[in-house]
Image (spheres, helix red, strand yellow):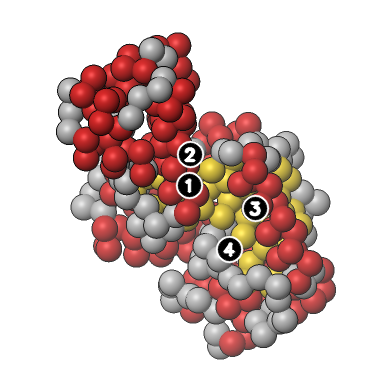
Amino acid sequence: MPSSPSSSVIEARKALANRLVEIRKDAGLTGAELSARCGWHESKTSLIQSGRTAPSEEDLRAWCAACGADDQVPDLIATSRAVDSMYTEWRRTEHSGLRAEQESVAPLYQRTSLFRVYASRVLPGMVQTPEYTTAVLRSIQRHRVPVDDVEDAVNARMDRQRMLFSGRHRFGLLIEEYVLYAAVCDSGTMAGQLGQLITAASSPFVSLGIIPMGAERPHLPVEDFYMFDEAEVAVELTSGYLRITRPPEIAEYVRTFASFAAMAARGPHARLLITKAINALR
C-alpha cells in the first residue's frame, strides 16, 4: 500500500489492524503464539497490529487460519482492498499519459446527479475552457508525466463536460476568490476562462459561490475536493488523490461544504468579484 499523509487512510489502516487484534484475542492467542502458528517473526505481527505494515491477502488468510476464523477472510480481504484503493499516487495513474485518467472517471461522472466541488487551487474541471484546461494539464505534464498526450486529454475532458451539461446533472461550485487570480496561463486565456465562469453561473443547473478573500471564516482553506452525490468524495493532494467512501467521512465533507457555502458570495456579488478579477488582468 503506498504511503499517504491522509489521516483518513491512516485511520482506515488502524481500523483493519484493530480487527486483527480482536480476532487474535478472541482466539485466546498471544502475539508470539500467533506468529509461531503463521511461521513468521514476532516483529511482523507487531507491525501489522500497529497498522504500520499493511497485511497482504496471504497474511490475512494465515492470520485467520491461525485463529480459527476462516469465515472472516472474505470480509477482511474486501476491507483491505478498499483501504488500498483509498489513496492513489498520481504516478500510478499518469505513467502512460493524462488521457486515460480523464476517461477513467467518466462512468462516475455519468451516474452522479449532484456534484459539489470546492476549489482552492484551480477552477473546477467541469467549467474550464479548452485553453485553460490545456494550460493546467500542460503544467502537470511538464512536471511529472513522461508521455505528452495533453491534446487528447483536453478533448476527453471537453467530451465529458458536454455530457455533464445535458440537463441531467446539478452543480454546486464553491471557489476561493484568490483562485480567480491564480493564473496558470496567459492573461487572455484567463480572461476567457473567467468569462466562461460567469456564463456557467447563469445555467439553471449551476449554483456558484465565491468565497471572498479576507472573509471571517470558521474553516481555513483545504484541498480541492469533489463530491459525487453522497456516494464518494475525491480529494486532490499534491502526491495523489484520496477516494473516500465511508459514510461518516463523507458526512464530514458535507458539513465542511455547507460551512464554506455559508461564507460564499452569490449572484450579482459573485459576478462582481469575477469581473474585478477580469479587470485586474488588463
Residue at numbered disc 4: 119
Q: Earlier in the sequence, mark 3 or mark 4?
A: 4
Whether residue 201 sits left or right of residue 182 in the image: it is right
Residue 210, image x and y in percent? 70, 70
Q: Amino acid at mark 2?
A: Ala
Residue 216 in the image: above or below residue 200: below
Residue at numbered disc 3: 253
Q: Earlier in the sequence, mark 1 or mark 3?
A: 1
Q: Amino acid at mark 4?
A: Ala
Residue at numbered disc 2: 15
* Labelled pair 2, 1 in contact (Cβ < 8 Å): yes
| Residue at mark 1 to residue at mark 3: CA–CA distance | 16 Å
The N terminus - image quarter: top left
User: Label 2 crowding class (10 Å Cα cut-off): few <14, some 14-19, many 20+?
Assistant: some
For image coordinates 45% across by 37% down, the residue present is 18
* Labelled pair 2, 3 in contact (Cβ < 8 Å): no
Whether residue 209 sits left or right of residue 101 in the image: it is right
Under tag 4, what secondary structure?
strand
Q: Nearer the viewer, mark 2 or mark 3?
A: 2
The C terminus - image quarter: bottom right
Q: Nearer the viewer, mark 1 or mark 3?
A: 1
Q: Nearer the viewer, mark 1 or mark 4?
A: 1
| Residue at mark 3 to residue at mark 4: CA–CA distance | 13 Å
User: Label 3 crowding class (10 Å Cα cut-off): few <14, some 14-19, many 20+?
Assistant: some
Residue at numbered disc 1: 11
Q: Amino acid at mark 3?
A: Tyr
| Residue at mark 4 to residue at mark 2: CA–CA distance | 30 Å
For image coordinates 75% across by 59% down, the residue present is 258
Q: Nearer the viewer, mark 4 or mark 2?
A: 2
Q: Earlier in the sequence, mark 4 or mark 2?
A: 2
Whether residue 221 sits left or right of residue 58 in the image: it is right
